Each structure stands twice: as structure tokens, then as C-alpha cells.
Amino acid sequence: MGAREVNYGRLKVVRLGGPLVSAHLLVSDDALTLIDTGLWGIPGELRSVVRRLGRSPGDLRDIVLTHGHLDHTGGAAEIQAWSGARVWVHPADREHVEQRVNYTGLARGCGTLERAGVVVGRLGGWCYQAPVIGGELRDGDVLPFAAGLRVWHLPGHTPGHCALVAEGVLGDKGGGLVFSGDVFASYSWSVHRPPAFLTRDRSRAEVSLRELAMARPVAVLPSHYDRMEPGLHARRLTQLANKRRNVV
Ligand SMILES: [Zn+2]
Ligand SMILES: [Zn+2]
């Protein structure tokens, strides 16, 4: 699968999970920050990574969720119980994380899928529990950890979908590493928007995709991707956005 970590300025980013879905651990001098919590396997993998880094559970202070889908929130409660970390999410996805969301239209398929995921998890002895949400993400806020993590509200996929930009680590050199959540998925065989049935508002999601592409980021890590090469995904994003697409 290639590299499992990259250094970006003063920040080390460790990939948890794999091509199906990834979460990212941000390692800075003072603390650990987790972006998304993946599905069932992530809490165990996280524990061994934290051990390998010579850190303790209490060093993980914050968990930032890009949005409420189960493949991004599955391990949140377990990791929170282990570390005591504060969980952040945009208010528009709060009910989703707490499994109180009502799906409408095409997105009902997503609800069915999430319920199926919970059932399959139960068969394996895993039960989805909602974490305690302790922080709200607001567009433009710069969270005071990981050397400064900017919240970028990019709704459509879900109403509260956010990207996070690690932009404090490069000093005044500019740029930033964008954790783009589910704005797009990036594989050598296919660079694509999330499937329609997983997206609440396709028109709004398209606006978000273009907003992200027009900012011309040089380093992007989506949640669903093949190789851990942020420059590669930035280039693929540009190519995807340049392809014309009619949104109904
Ligand atoms: Zn999603
Ligand atoms: Zn996803």
C-alpha cells in the first residue's frame, strides 16, 4: 500500500485504515489530533501507533470528524473512552453522529447502508455508540491544535461536511495540507465524486468540489484513496473538477 505516514512541515501525519477508508493521526510536538475515526479496526490500530510513537492515550486531545457517515465516525466513542479526547463536528451533522438523522430521497439508501453496517458490526461484537460531542466546527475557525487547523465547511455530501486545513505548519511559506473528507475519492483507476445515494445534495456538493479545486491546494488527503501522496491527490482533484458534469 506504500507509505503510511508523511511529514508536512513540522507535522507528521499517520494514515490509519486503508484504501477502503482512512483516518489520519496528526502528530505535533505538544499533542495528537485525529481526523475521523474509521470503522471497526481503527481503534486497535491507533493504540499500537500511539505506543510506537512513545505517546500515551491522554496525548490524544482532539478528534475532528469531517462528517457524520458511519465509516468516518465508527470508532469515535471507543477512542474517546480510551483517550478522553474531545470530539468536534459541525452542528449540521451532530444528529447524524448521534444516529438521529432522517434520510430523505436517494439518501435513504445511505441510511439503509449505515443500519446494515451497524448490524454487521454487531455480529462481530461491535456496536455503534455515539461519542459525546464537545466542540462545534464553524467555517473559518482555526482550531488551536496541530499548529492550527482551519475549518472549511464544504457541504452537500452531508449538510455539515467539513474539510480541515493544516496550514500553520509551514510558517509563512503558505499552502496547507487539506483533509478533504468525502468531497471526492481518489484512486489510480478512478477519481470520482461520492455515489449519488451517499450524497444529500448533489448540486451543493458540486459547488463545494469546485470551491476546493479553485483554491488550488497543493496537498490533499481525501478519506478514500490509494497512495499516501498529497501532491498526487491535489492534481487529480484539478483534473476531476475540469471534467464537465451535468448535475440534476
Ligand atoms: Zn461520506
Ligand atoms: Zn466516506
Image (cartoon, grey):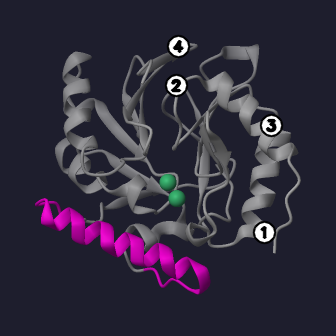
- Mark-to-mark CA distance, 4 and 2: 18 Å
**Mark 3 or mark 1: whose residue is earlier in sequence:** 1
Is residue 95 found left or right of 231 in the rendered image? left
- Is the residue under label 1 in contact with that under label 3 (CB below 8 Å)? no
In the figure, 149 relative to 126: above or below? Answer: above
Is disc 3 placed on a helix, strand or loop?
helix
Task: Count the numbered circles shown.
Answer: 4
- Judging by the rendered image, the residue that carries numbered circle 2 is 228
User: What quarter of the picture does the N terminus occupy?
Assistant: top left
Instruction: Farthest residue to the front: give it.
Output: 189
Of labels 4 and 2, the one closer to you: 2
Magenta residues, dominant SS class = helix
Residue 130 sits in quarter: bottom left
Is disc 2 placed on a helix, strand or loop?
loop
User: Residue 66: x percent and y percent?
Assistant: 52, 52
- Judging by the rendered image, the residue that carries numbered circle 3 is 238
**Mark 2 or mark 1: whose residue is earlier in sequence:** 1
- Mark-to-mark CA distance, 3 and 4: 26 Å
User: Residue 68: x percent and y percent?
Assistant: 46, 63
* Amino acid type for the residue under numbered disc 3: Thr
- Judging by the rendered image, the residue that carries numbered circle 1 is 203
Near mark 2 (Cα within 10 A), the count class, few <14, some 14-19 or many ≥20, is many
Magenta-colored span: 101-127
* Amino acid type for the residue under numbered disc 2: Met
